[in-house]
Image (tube, grey):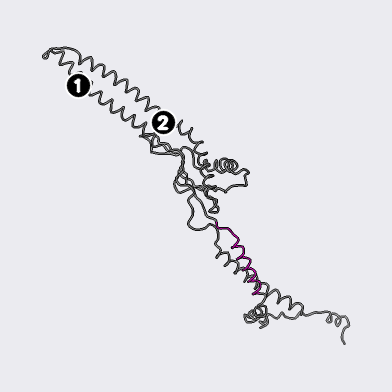
Amino acid sequence: MSNPEEDSRKELVYVRPAADYSYSDADEISLVDLWLVLVRRKWILLGITLLCLALGAGYAWMQPVVYEYKTGIELARIHGGPESEGLELLSPREGSVVFLQNVIIPTQRESLFGEEGNGPRIQVEEQKTDYTLMLLSTAKPKDVNQVKRLHEAVVEALADQHKPVLKKNIEVITKPFEARTKMLEKQIELLRDQLQRLSSRSHNENSISSLVDAQQMGDIREELSKIQVRMTDARSAVEMIREASNPTRISYLAAESEDPAGPGKTLIAALSLILGLMLGVFAAFFMEFLASARA
């Protein structure tokens, strides 16, 4: 005889069915179905592609042709003398770059073209060599004169900042050589006076005093020649320092690039075509999704 409580417990037991993870053909994405969607929505795909291509071509056609104009700057360098390693920068190149970007370029643009927003923009770039910089501006060919005026004014302003410092450093380096030259000139003058006094004496040809004077005159001439060589070296050092030291100057002015700057019209049109195809494919599948959802 059955127990009513056990029968009720058996009725409450729930057995979960085993999950079915078997593969179904419905889960497969068919490339044929995707192609058929694109065929059905071909007018949407074609319309969006042509629209993007037309907009891109119009934008490319409206863009003006601009070129890059480059001006080279040789920064001021000073020669340290015969015993130095040669030419050295008057001031660090990084400091000149910061000064150009933050002070000189904004000031000159405002001075030449009024407000700060007018006039060509200038970008300062460091070159491979340690003593050169480059000013880079992008402008239309008809505005090249403005670029030249601005670049010249910027370089002149930088040169004016370096001139007093360069002059002072040259004076400091050449001062010891100039002092040595003056000292040697005095020694030469004294030796020549001695030589003149000895030569003006009257002696007998066979006297001992004449032989002594001749010996002294020979020693004086030898010493005089050595001093003259040292004085020539000191003067040459001064001339070398003055002539070898270079002020800040322009190496080339507003050189035009061979090709226009920025993306070309062909590239813009090609990118517009690619973007149009992408948007057209997305729009085709989205419209197919909306149609399926409504159905």
The region drawn magenta spans: 45-65
Which residue is found at the position 47% from the left and 51% from the top? 255
Classify mark 1: residues with Cα within 10 Å, few (<14), some (14-19) or many (20+): few
Tell me, for residue 53, which label it has, or none: none
From this view, report whether residue 290 is shown above or below residue 63.
below
Which residue is found at the position 26% from the left and 26% from the top? 226
From this view, report whether residue 245 is shown above or below residue 20.
above
Q: Is 159 displayed left or right of 195 in the figure? A: right
Q: Is 11 displayed left or right of 156 in the figure? A: right
Q: Position of residue 154 (x, y in %)?
A: 53, 42
Q: Is 140 displayed left or right of 224 in the figure? A: right
- Residue matched to label 1: 218
Q: Amino acid at mark 1?
A: Gly
Task: Give the quarter of the figure containing the C terminus.
Answer: bottom right
Which residue is found at the position 49% from the left and 55% from the top? 257
Task: Give the quarter of the figure containing the N terminus.
Answer: bottom right
Q: What secondary structure prevails in the magenta region?
A: helix
Taking the view exactly as shown, the residue that stands out farthest to the left is 206
Q: Are marks 1 and 2 in contact (CB under 8 Å)?
A: no
Q: Position of residue 204 (x, y in %)?
A: 12, 12
Taking the view exactly as shown, the residue that stands out farthest to the bottom is 1
Taking the view exactly as shown, the residue that stands out farthest to the front is 142
Q: Amino acid at mark 2?
A: Ile
Q: Nearer the viewer, residue 118 or 102?
A: 118
Q: Please check the rendered image and state whether residue 48 is part of the magenta-colored stretch, yes or no.
A: yes
Q: Is 13 displayed left or right of 21 in the figure? A: right
Q: Please check the rendered image and state whether residue 235 is part of the magenta-colored stretch, yes or no.
A: no
Q: Position of residue 293 (x, y in %)?
A: 75, 77
Q: Nearer the viewer, residue 20 or 198?
A: 198
Q: Quadrant of residue 130?
A: top left
Local secondary structure at mark 2:
helix
- Residue matched to label 2: 173
